[in-house]
Image (cartoon, rainbow, N blue to C red):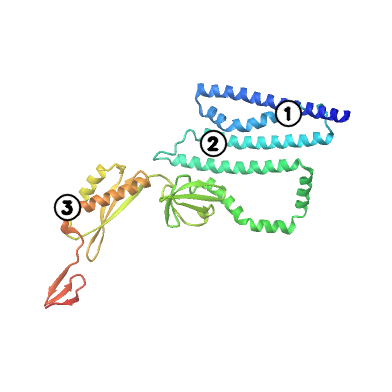
């Protein structure tokens, strides 16, 4: 009974010492981040706010673990050797996890610092989209690498897992080839992700046409890309698609774009009047950027003349609105000013027969 009480006292004293170290670590964490919060309020800088946002949680775990590791050496614990070894493994595991968590959150701090100078919610955001895409993909790659190394470090703490890993490596052989063959598509996608990060055929917020769908690049991961379709659907494609398949990128070099409107009118409509009306409509439109406009007769068909109106806009969204606006107002102008200029089907009566004058073929006998 006396030995049991002595063991219980040793356990209580040791765990009390560990609890004290944890409390000290949490207190130091509280003091440090109170100071950081005051500095952030005074300086109002992105770095200070980002440190508070990203690093507070992982350091709340890391600092107590470091305090335990530093202040509670193995010889100061009156515990059995097996218990001390078990505690050492647990503490080391928590330290590895917290360090990995801290490194992952540090990538968020770096992202905030790099992106603070760029705004993606403006019309001419080409440079910002380029930087956003690079930073986003590189951050995901770093997180992936950190997680792999953290998992390996945790497993190395346990002797049994270390032996299992050694035996698996020694007997990899055919199994390794099978796994490599099965994972070749995933590996290809990861390599495609690296290639896209470097060459950037697409960027975050790029306007693209893929699979006959119009949309914007919403997310780029190591293995897939999410395209936000105009009607709020989401098209998810493997990242290798943008390396292997053709697609349209409307904002590859700049956000501005040319829009076209086709009109089909009768031969009697004066083209110069249509051209002047187009100029007036564009000058009054808030969607036209004032750079380019043209009106050409692009075709002369059997019954109508094809007219193409060309106009520039700051981005694809404005181009869509501008095209709709020009189309509606031009149709309204022709209806009111030149109603006889609407498309017609011409016929003539010759020798008592109704004749299609464009094809000179007999259609219907007359009386």
Q: Which residue in the structure is indicated by mark 2?
A: 111
Q: Is residue 333 left or right of residue 78?
A: left
Q: Nearer the viewer, mark 1 or mark 2?
A: 1
Q: Residue at x 79, y 47 (%)?
A: 163
Q: Residues within 10 Å of mark 3 (few under 14, many from 20)?
A: few
Q: Secondary structure at mark 2?
A: helix
- Per the rendering, the mark at residue 153 is none
Q: Residues within 10 Å of mark 1 (few under 14, many from 20)?
A: many
Residue 137, relative to residue 47: is it above or below?
A: below
Q: Residue 363 location, x and y as percent?
A: 19, 75
Q: Point out the tag, 1 or 2, that comes first from the N-terminus.
A: 1
**Closer to the camera in the image, 172 or 32:** 32
Q: Point out the tag, 1 or 3, that comes first from the N-terminus.
A: 1
Q: Which residue in the structure is indicated by mark 3?
A: 336
Alpha carbons under labels 3 and 2: distance apart: 57 Å
In the rendered image, the quadrant that contains the N terminus is top right
In the rendered image, the quadrant that contains the C terminus is bottom left
Quadrant position of residue 338: bottom left
Q: Secondary structure at mark 1?
A: helix
Residue 130, relative to residue 359: is it above or below?
A: above
Q: Secondary structure at mark 3?
A: helix
- Per the rendering, the mark at residue 68 is 1
Q: Residue 251 location, x and y as percent?
A: 42, 47
Alpha carbons under labels 1 and 2: distance apart: 32 Å
């Amino acid at each position: 009974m006396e030995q049991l009480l002595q063991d219980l006292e040793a356990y209580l004293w040791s765990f009390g010492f560990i609890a004290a170290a944890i409390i000290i670590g949490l207190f130091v964490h509280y003091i440090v981040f109170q100071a950081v919060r005051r500095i952030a309020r005074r300086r109002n800088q992105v770095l200070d706010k980002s440190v508070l946002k990203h690093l507070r949680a992982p350091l709340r775990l890391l600092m107590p673990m470091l305090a335990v590791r530093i202040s509670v050496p193995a010889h100061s614990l009156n515990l059995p050797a097996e218990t001390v070894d078990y505690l050492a493994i647990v503490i080391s595991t928590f330290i590895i996890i917290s360090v990995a968590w801290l490194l992952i959150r540090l990538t968020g701090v770096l992202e905030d610092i790099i992106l603070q100078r760029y705004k993606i919610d403006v019309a001419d955001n080409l440079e910002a989209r380029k930087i956003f895409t690079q930073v986003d993909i590189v951050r995901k790659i770093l997180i992936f690498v950190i997680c792999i190394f953290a998992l390996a470090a945790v497993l190395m703490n346990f002797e049994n897992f270390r032996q299992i890993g050694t035996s698996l490596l020694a007997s990899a052989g055919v199994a390794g080839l099978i796994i490599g063959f099965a994972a070749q598509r995933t590996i290809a996608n990861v390599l495609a992700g690296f290639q896209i990060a470097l060459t950037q055929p697409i960027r975050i917020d790029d306007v693209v046409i893929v699979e006959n769908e119009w949309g914007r690049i919403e997310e780029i991961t190591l293995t897939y890309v999410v395209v936000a379709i105009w009607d709020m659907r989401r098209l998810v494609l493997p990242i290798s698609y943008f390396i292997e398949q053709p697609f349209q990128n409307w904002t590859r070099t700049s956000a501005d774009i040319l829009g076209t409107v086709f009109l089909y009118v009768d031969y009697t409509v004066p083209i110069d009047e249509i051209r002047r009306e187009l100029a007036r409509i564009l000058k009054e439109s808030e969607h036209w950027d004032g750079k380019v406009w043209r009106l050409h007769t692009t075709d002369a068909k059997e019954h109508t003349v094809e007219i193409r109106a060309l106009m520039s806009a700051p981005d694809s969204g404005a181009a869509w609105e501008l095209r709709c606006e020009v189309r509606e107002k031009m149709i309204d102008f022709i209806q009111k000013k030149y109603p006889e200029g609407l498309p017609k089907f011409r016929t003539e009566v010759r020798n008592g027969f109704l004749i299609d004058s464009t094809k000179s073929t007999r259609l219907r006998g007359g009386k």
